[in-house]
């Protein structure tokens, strides 16, 4: 019997798992995807927001600011990507300035201390490539950028190291409420390395952090009190040579019709523009399309007109888990011991650590005992990244493990050693995209053209997976379909 | 491992090998070829089809055969090579190559001359902005070629190919021979972008339809590709909405162009030509950075390997001259693309470095028939070449004689199609 079962391994589930792992609790963590962070957490702007935007008095406002502060503490132990580059909300006229003033006041109420209304010259000094017509801006130094999946992976690794039992490829399909516990049934579709987990789990409490599917999961225990509507946002990601066009996160002043389009460097210094917003019917619909992205480009040009569209390396989309209640839903439901953490749309990535604290408070108020583990490991080792290492460190590393000297991804300078390392980390992985998220192999300008055959080989060598079973991500996304006739003949 | 060489060649494909061999034959003793793969040969190793070497070796070879001939020459000349080693950057200040390898760790190798011969990479789905979902089953043609020919795996069985570049055409045939169904090759331009013989031998001979003035506008499928939407394009290459239609397939191969891989060159301060996306070089293939040379597909994308070998040999001679302090850096003549010409390599000439002549490699902008490529200085025509047909997919070559350049008044040579 587990004390707690967490459903969903997005940023919210990861932050909760990490925080709970400090205590003497027996925790099971279920995720239907083949890795952590494969839901909304993998495709968003990656901004650690300042906390000035959400309306004062909402949970969003309160938890966003607190989350921002917590990340800045957590990073010291967990070494995830975080770069506090600051943000501008730019304006072009007095009307915009009035809106910025309101944002400023809202931010002060929310406890954001470092806000500043600045003039166009101030913006230009920091951001020489932006539209010269900018007349004013709200400047927020305490805004940061992260790589959202690497962030979630870091939290998940720490949780697992401290005893949380993560089970991937395990979709929760039924939950029965007994007197003092829940019977949870999963549908298990393994790819390869994962253990053969039992399909039935008993847990005293359930935390529903299933993102876009939080309403579906809640319905499994008969709860129908909220609905999640997917709202798509599309992006264009540019080559690293476009990254230096901006140094900070640049938002446009929101108008009654539009929140504007964001222009930002990513943590790894690509240029990112987006997202727009469209309500879609299907939660899994992540297709991008030409007409919406043309609008994204048009709107982004108001901020920055000099990006080179030929330098786009990919487009992608993420779906917001918008609830019909408008604010985050974090509460014990009508079903005793079943806690909903739902409707976590933006700024959910930012708020996640504070959401975890908030959930612990709910559990504490229910009388759950929180005894700290004596052997809790606060520290998590970062990954080696050959691209970021100096000569001396590299030489020492290659001497110890020569595979760090063999580059398999030439665009991002990722070595075979880094892939070996990713496969040995706490989260058991066996897909291309999982390797890509950890090492950046395949993220670059050639979009995995060069490294695909090499990574197939490494997965074959390390995990003994037949090449035909190696997938991009989920089952059904295998890369190759079988041997060629020529290869079969040569073998004979 | 030695820490300095007279010449370091980056890239062990046909270009790097030919440049090294020529430098050696012209008196340079101390040469190192650095290659990231575990074998020399570069992209040729995965091109198992026929048709290489007709000009250079005067016989039809497969890619691996051509590369093994080149490797034999490298061996015969006793040229050192360092395999399984990736060059990360070139520092021009002290002319040092920075590289890493499993065996040697982080390497810094000094060189009097450096040859950039890193080849090219393929344009991707993102670069041509095909939207839709992101399932597996979307490959660049070269990646599919490597998976099939080196690793022995099939990328799919019902295939649409976008782009009629040569790799795409060759792969259409290869996939068909392996039992896959190639539904069609879709080409944005109103003409095929591959060599005419490939269009005939790889498509027409196998009844694979070639749809000109069409493109892929959307990719469908969640896990694996389930189909693509194609559309006709207008004269500006923009898809016409009304002509959109769905094509059922499990694989999309992209053969939409090659991009010279010049990240290292850029880092070294080498100036690039926006038309070729490769370095701007003189008649001896020296770039604007003294002691740094460039040849092969990293300089400009070639249609046949024979031209790579030929140009790289000239580059190797240039390296030898440079190391012997016999190469002059000033520019005496500039080559300018005129009417109908897209690009010219080399872009500049120093007459004093020429023996008798210089050979130019050019691409035309559009198809033309019964025309001539003409080189002129002012009003004076110094060279001319007629052909029944000029194609954008095909290299046009033209030789300029030193004596003609010497006698004509002026230093700008304009090349045009007339
Ligand atoms: C376009 C866009 C831009 C955004 N930008 C930002 C930003 O810049 N800054 C910011 O702070 N926030 C941003 N957000 C919001 C942020 O991305 C989300 O709030 C956050 O990622 C939500 O995390 P989550 O863990 O709740 O959901 P998810 O990441 O979706 O995680 C839920 C997990 O539950 C799993 N699951 C679902 N059903 C089941 C089941 N039955 N059994 C087992 N597992 C299940 C899913 O597979 C998934 O992994 C953005 C969102 C979008 C869409």
Image: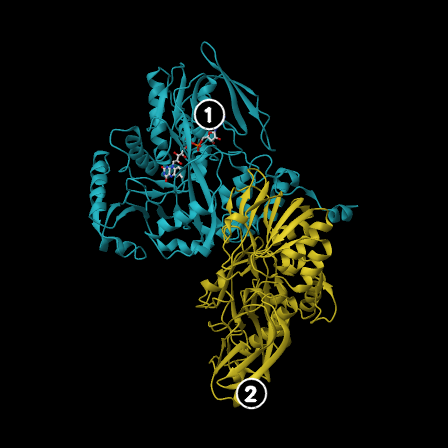
Residue B54 picture location, percent across and down: 71, 69
Q: Residue furthest right?
A: A492
Q: Residue furthest bottom?
A: B407
Local packing at callout 2 (Cα closer than 10 Å; few below 14, some 14-19, many 20+) is some
Residue drawn at 35 percent across, 25 percent down: A329
Residue A270 shows in this picture: yes
**Circles 2 and 1: CB atoms closer than 8 Å:** no
Relative to residue B178, is residue B106 drawn left or right? Answer: left
**What label sits on residue A281 in the rendered view?**
none
Q: Nearer the viewer, residue B293 or B213?
A: B213
Residue A370 picture location, percent across and down: 37, 20
Local packing at callout 1 (Cα closer than 10 Å; few below 14, some 14-19, many 20+) is many
Image quarter for ligand 1 equals top left
Which chain appears cyan?
A
Which chain appears yellow?
B
Q: Nearer the viewer, residue B334 or B9?
A: B334
Residue drawn at 53 percent across, 76 percent down: B416
Tell me if residue B172 comes above or below residue A327 in the rendering: below
Residue at the spot of label 1: A7
Say which element carries label 1. strand
Say which element carries label 2. helix
Callout 1: CB less than 8 Å from ligand 1: yes
The residue marked by circle 2 belongs to what chain?
B
Judge depth for marks 2 and 1 and give the one in front.
2
Number of numbered discs visible in the structure rendering: 2
The residue marked by circle 1 belongs to what chain?
A
Residue at the spot of label 2: B404
């Amino acid at each position: 019997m587990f004390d707690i079962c967490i459903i969903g391994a997005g940023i919210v589930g990861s932050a909760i798992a990490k925080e709970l792992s400090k205590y003497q609790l027996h925790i099971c963590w279920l995720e239907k995807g083949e890795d952590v962070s494969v839901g909304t957490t993998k495709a968003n702007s990656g901004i650690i927001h300042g906390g000035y935007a959400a309306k004062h008095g909402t949970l969003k406002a309160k938890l966003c600011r607190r989350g921002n502060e917590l990340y800045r503490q957590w990073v010291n132990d967990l070494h995830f990507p975080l770069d506090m580059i600051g943000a501008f909300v730019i304006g072009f006229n007095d009307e915009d300035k009035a809106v910025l003033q309101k944002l400023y006041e809202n931010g002060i109420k929310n406890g954001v201390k470092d806000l500043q209304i600045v003039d166009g010259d101030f913006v230009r000094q920091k951001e020489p490539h932006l539209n010269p017509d900018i007349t004013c801006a709200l400047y927020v130094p305490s805004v940061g950028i992260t790589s959202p999946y690497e962030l979630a992976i870091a939290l998940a690794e720490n949780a697992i190291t401290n005893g949380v039992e993560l089970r991937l490829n395990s979709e929760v399909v039924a939950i029965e409420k007994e007197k003092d516990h829940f019977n949870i049934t999963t549908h298990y579709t393994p790819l390869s390395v994962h253990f053969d987990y039992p399909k039935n789990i008993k847990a005293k409490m359930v935390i529903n952090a299933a993102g876009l599917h939080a309403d579906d999961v809640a319905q499994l225990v008969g709860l129908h009190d909220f609905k999640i509507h997917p709202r798509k946002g599309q992006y264009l990601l540019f080559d690293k040579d476009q990254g230096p066009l901006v140094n900070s996160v640049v938002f446009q002043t929101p108008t009654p019709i539009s929140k504007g389009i964001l222009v930002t460097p990513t943590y790894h210094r690509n240029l990112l523009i987006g997202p727009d917003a469209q309500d879609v019917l299907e939660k899994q619909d992540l297709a991008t399309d030409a007409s919406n992205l043309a609008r994204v480009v048009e709107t982004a040009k108001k901020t920055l007109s000099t990006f080179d569209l030929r330098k786009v390396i990919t487009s992608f989309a993420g779906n917001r888990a918008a609830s019909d209640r408008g604010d985050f839903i974090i509460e014990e439901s009508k079903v005793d011991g079943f806690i909903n953490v739902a409707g976590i749309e933006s700024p959910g990535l930012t708020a996640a650590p504070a959401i975890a604290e908030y959930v612990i408070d709910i559990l504490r108020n229910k009388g759950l005992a929180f005894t700290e583990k004596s052997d809790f490991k606060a520290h998590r080792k970062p990954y080696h990244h050959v691209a970021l290492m100096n000569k001396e460190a590299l030489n020492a590393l290659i001497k110890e493990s020569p595979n760090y000297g063999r580059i398999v991804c030439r665009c991002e300078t990722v070595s075979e050693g880094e892939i070996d390392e990713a496969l040995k980390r706490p989260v058991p992985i066996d897909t291309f995209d999982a390797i890509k998220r950890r090492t950046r192999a395949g993220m670059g300008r050639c979009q995995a053209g060069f490294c695909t055959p090499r990574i197939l080989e490494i997965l074959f060598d390390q995990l003994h997976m037949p090449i035909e079973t190696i997938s991009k991500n989920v089952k059904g996304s295998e890369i190759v379909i079988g041997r060629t006739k020529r290869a079969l003949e040569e073998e004979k | 491992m030695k820490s300095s060489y007279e010449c370091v060649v980056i890239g062990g494909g046909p270009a790097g090998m030919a440049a090294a061999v020529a430098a050696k034959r012209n008196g340079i003793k101390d040469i190192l070829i650095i290659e990231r793969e575990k074998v020399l040969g570069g992209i040729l190793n995965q091109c198992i089809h026929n048709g290489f070497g007709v000009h250079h070796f005067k016989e039809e070879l497969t890619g691996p055969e051509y590369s093994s001939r080149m490797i034999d020459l490298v061996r015969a000349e006793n040229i050192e090579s360092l395999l399984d080693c990736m060059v990360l950057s070139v520092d021009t200040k002290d002319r040092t190559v920075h590289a890493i390898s499993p065996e040697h760790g982080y390497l810094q190798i000094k060189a009097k001359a450096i040859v950039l011969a890193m080849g090219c990479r393929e344009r991707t789905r993102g670069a041509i902005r095909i939207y839709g979902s992101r399932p597996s089953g979307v490959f660049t043609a070269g990646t599919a070629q490597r998976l099939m020919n080196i690793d022995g795996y099939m990328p799919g069985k019902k295939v649409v190919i976008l782009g009629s570049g040569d790799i795409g055409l060759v792969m259409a045939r290869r996939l068909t021979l392996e039992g896959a169904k190639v539904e069609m090759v879709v080409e944005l331009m109103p003409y095929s972008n591959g060599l005419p013989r490939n269009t005939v031998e790889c498509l027409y001979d196998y009844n694979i339809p070639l749809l000109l003035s069409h493109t892929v506008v959307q990719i469908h499928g969640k896990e694996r590709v389930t189909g693509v939407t194609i559309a006709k394009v207008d004269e500006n290459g923009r898809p016409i909405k009304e002509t959109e239609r769905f094509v059922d397939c499990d694989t999309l191969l992209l053969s939409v162009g090659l991009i010279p891989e010049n990240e290292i060159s850029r880092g070294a301060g080498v100036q690039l030509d926006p038309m070729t996306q490769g370095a701007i070089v003189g008649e001896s293939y020296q770039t604007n950075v003294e002691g740094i040379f460039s040849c092969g597909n990293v300089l400009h994308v070639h249609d046949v390997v024979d031209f790579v070998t030929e140009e790289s040999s000239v580059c190797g001679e240039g390296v030898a001259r440079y190391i012997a302090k016999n190469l002059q850096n000033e520019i005496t003549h500039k080559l300018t693309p005129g009417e109908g010409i897209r690009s010219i390599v080399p872009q500049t000439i120093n007459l004093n470095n020429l023996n008798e002549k210089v050979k130019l490699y050019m691409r035309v902008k559009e198809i033309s028939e019964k025309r001539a490529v003409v080189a002129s200085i002012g009003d004076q025509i110094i060279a001319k070449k007629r052909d029944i047909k000029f194609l954008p997919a095909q290299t046009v070559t033209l030789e300029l004689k030193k004596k003609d350049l010497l006698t004509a008044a002026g230093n700008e040579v304009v090349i045009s199609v007339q």
